[in-house]
Image: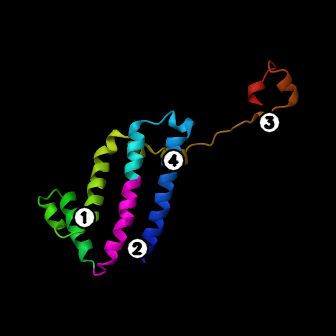
Amino acid sequence: MAMIAGGACGVLTLVGGILLLKRRLFSPRVRATTTGADILILSLLVIQCALGLLTIPFSAQHMDGSEMMKLVGWAQSVVTFHGGASEHLDGVAFIFRLHLVLGMTLFLLFPFSRLVHIWSVPVEYLTRKYQLVSRTSLIPFNRILNPTSVGFFYA
């Protein structure tokens, strides 16, 4: 069940990433503000998602969880800074190793890309007072004809 749901979400993510990359590359308006780092990071994220989807058939061959336990041991060694983390990856399929290397590469590039803006989520928007927005369509017609009248911008 997890592989099916994860695969479905992975396919949706991959399609969305490809659409974003296409827009960033071929839309002149978006391309004008795009840096090389933006394209690199988005390309790496799309490749990482594709690699993740390619691991599903390999995971399906080891339904007993033996492959997963090797990867869990590797992750625990990396997170707790224990040496010999690579020993956990002995016998693990190459696609998993490639997925891990690219994931660590993304972690290394994270602070030097626009991904760092993830940490600046404007949470205060949820608690601040609402703002009144006036539209020009609500301005009486006589004020449009005579913009020098008092209160033109406060209609």
- Which of these two is toward me, 1 or 118? 1
Measured as percent of width and height from the top left, residue 125 is found at: 54, 44
Q: Residue beneath label 2, please?
A: 3
Q: Are marks 3 and 2 in contact (CB under 8 Å)?
A: no
Badge 4 element: helix
Q: Residue beneath label 4, please?
A: 22
Going from the N terminus, do you reach mark 4 or mark 1 first? 4
Going from the N terminus, do you reach mark 3 or mark 4 first? 4
Q: Name the outermost residue toward the front.
A: 26
- Which of these two is toward me, 117 or 101? 101
Going from the N terminus, do you reach mark 1 or mark 3 first? 1
Label 1, label 3: how many angstroms apart (C-alpha)?
61 Å
Q: Is 149 positioned to the left or the right of 128 in the image?
A: right
> What residue is shown at x 25% (from left), y 73% (from top)?
67
Label 3, label 2: how many angstroms apart (C-alpha)?
52 Å
Label 3, label 4: how many angstroms apart (C-alpha)?
36 Å
Label 4, label 2: how many angstroms apart (C-alpha)?
28 Å
Q: Residue beneath label 3, please?
A: 137
Q: Residue beneath label 1, please?
A: 94
Extent of the magenta region: 46-64
Badge 1 element: helix
Q: Is residue 84 above or below residue 3?
A: above
Task: Give the number of the mark in front: 3 or 4.
Answer: 4
Label 2, label 1: how many angstroms apart (C-alpha)?
19 Å
Q: Amino acid at mark 3?
A: Ser
Q: Amino acid at mark 4?
A: Lys
Q: Is residue 120 above or below residue 144?
A: below
- Quadrant in which the N terminus is drawn: bottom left
